[in-house]
Image (cartoon, rainbow, N blue to C red):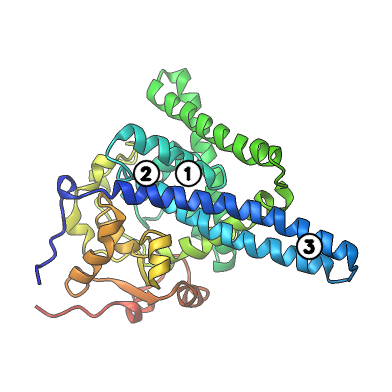
């Protein structure tokens, strides 16, 4: 068997057709789910109008909420594909990468793409470093508060970034202001889709968009808490990573040797369907060590390096959350040690 070689940025093959297919499929499934919710609610109401029973509302809203959970799983899949755009590995063309990434990011709770890039790449630069990592505001709380409120805090912080970008026009920082305007365009486009086009074709927001948006921050936390929660506070040569600089995708192929020794993220082993649906984001530690690579490489890199690089591994998201519920955002080495994958001695 040929030994797997971790590609450098110029050596990787971006799966553009696969990314396009998955993006269109997930968006189509989301729209179909909205249509199914409307058809189902209409049918349930019609049935109980002829056969009145106390269970009417229970049946109807159970149906609506099951589909809303399904929608949130789809939105998470869309968010992870958009995350490829954040790192510039959705499509080779920067124009199509940012256009498609902008639309798909906005589909997820009207999240602004360029603000997300600013937030996320800064997070990569300062992963799990107290006072520097922007995700600290989301999750450095008791577990249940982080679980319930982390997604809402993230949304607020992203729009704070949009505001700062728009206000940059007064200091003549035109590129920042332009990014702010593009975010407004993407969010406005998707807002029109959700709140104008869907009602226009007879799809009620009450049974589709609103329940989905209410549940989405919870589903976000279900996945995102299993990224970095409960690791020891990370150390980094901050002098080489000035906090005054805005993170950029060009930073990502630097200091890899040091990053390979640091454990600040989980690897969640899950089933093949979830691997595909959420584009291998469960290999979070691998992604943080090789953020410039497409998601398709992450499982192979884990298999190739799991005995030579340290990893904290857990089987399944539910088991991960069960472990985290009694831990703090910044933990101790003793708490993480039971999850470390055994490395071969060399």
Judged from the image, the secondary structure of the residue bearing numbered disc 3 is helix
Mark linked to residue 86: 2
Residue 87 % position (x, y): 32, 45
Instruction: Judge by depth and name the residue closer to the eye, 143 or 32.
Output: 32
Left or right of 148 in this view: 82:
left
Decide which of tag 2 and tag 1 comes sooner along the chain.
2
Mark linked to residue 153: none
Instruction: Judge by depth and name the residue closer to the eye, 298 or 71.
Output: 71
The reply to whether dot 3 and dot 2 touch (C-beta < 8 Å) is no
The reply to whether dot 2 and dot 1 touch (C-beta < 8 Å) is yes
CA–CA distance in space, label 3 to label 1: 33 Å
Q: As displayed, is residue 57 above or below residue 29?
A: below
Left or right of 109 in this view: 262:
left
Residue with the mark numbered 1 = 105
In the image, what residue occupies the spot 36% across and 43% down?
A: 85
Instruction: Judge by depth and name the residue closer to the eye, 98 or 158.
Output: 98
In the image, what residue occupies the spot 82% across and 60% down?
A: 45
**Label 3 crowd bin: few (<14), some (14–19), many (20+), radius 10 Å:** some
Residue 263 % position (x, y): 29, 66
Residue with the mark numbered 3 = 44
CA–CA distance in space, label 2 to label 1: 9 Å
């Amino acid at each position: 068997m040929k030994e797997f070689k971790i590609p450098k940025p110029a050596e990787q093959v971006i799966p553009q057709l696969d990314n396009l297919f998955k993006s269109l499929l997930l968006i189509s499934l989301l729209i179909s789910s909205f249509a199914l919710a409307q058809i189902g609610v209409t049918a349930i109401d019609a049935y109980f109008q002829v056969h009145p029973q106390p269970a009417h509302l229970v049946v109807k809203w159970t149906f609506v909420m099951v589909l809303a959970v399904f929608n949130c799983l789809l939105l998470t899949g869309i968010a992870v594909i958009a995350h490829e755009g954040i790192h510039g590995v959705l499509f080779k063309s920067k124009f199509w990468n940012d256009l498609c990434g902008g639309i798909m990011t906005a589909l997820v709770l009207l999240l602004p793409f360029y603000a997300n890039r600013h937030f996320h790449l800064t997070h990569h630069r300062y992963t799990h470093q107290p006072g520097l990592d922007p995700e600290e505001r989301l999750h450095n709380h008791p577990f249940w508060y982080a679980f319930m409120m982390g997604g809402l805090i993230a949304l607020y912080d992203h729009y704070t970034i949009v505001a700062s970008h728009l206000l940059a026009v007064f200091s003549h920082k035109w590129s920042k202001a332009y990014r702010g305007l593009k975010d407004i365009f993407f969010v406005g486009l998707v807002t029109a889709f959700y709140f104008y086009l869907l009602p226009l074709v007879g799809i009620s927001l009450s049974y589709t968009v609103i329940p989905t948006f209410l549940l989405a921050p919870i589903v976000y936390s279900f996945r995102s808490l299993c990224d970095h929660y409960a690791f020891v506070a990370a150390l980094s040569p901050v002098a080489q990573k000035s906090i005054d600089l805005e993170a950029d995708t060009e930073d990502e192929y630097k200091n890899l040797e040091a990053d390979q020794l640091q454990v600040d993220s989980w690897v969640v082993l899950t089933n093949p369907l979830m691997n595909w649906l959420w584009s291998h984001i469960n290999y979070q530690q691998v992604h943080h060590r090789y953020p410039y690579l497409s998601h398709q490489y992450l499982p192979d890199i884990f298999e190739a390096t799991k005995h030579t690089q340290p990893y904290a591994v857990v089987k399944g998201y539910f088991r991960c959350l069960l472990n985290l519920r009694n831990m703090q955002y910044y933990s101790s080495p003793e708490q993480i040690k039971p999850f470390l994958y055994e490395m071969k001695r060399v």
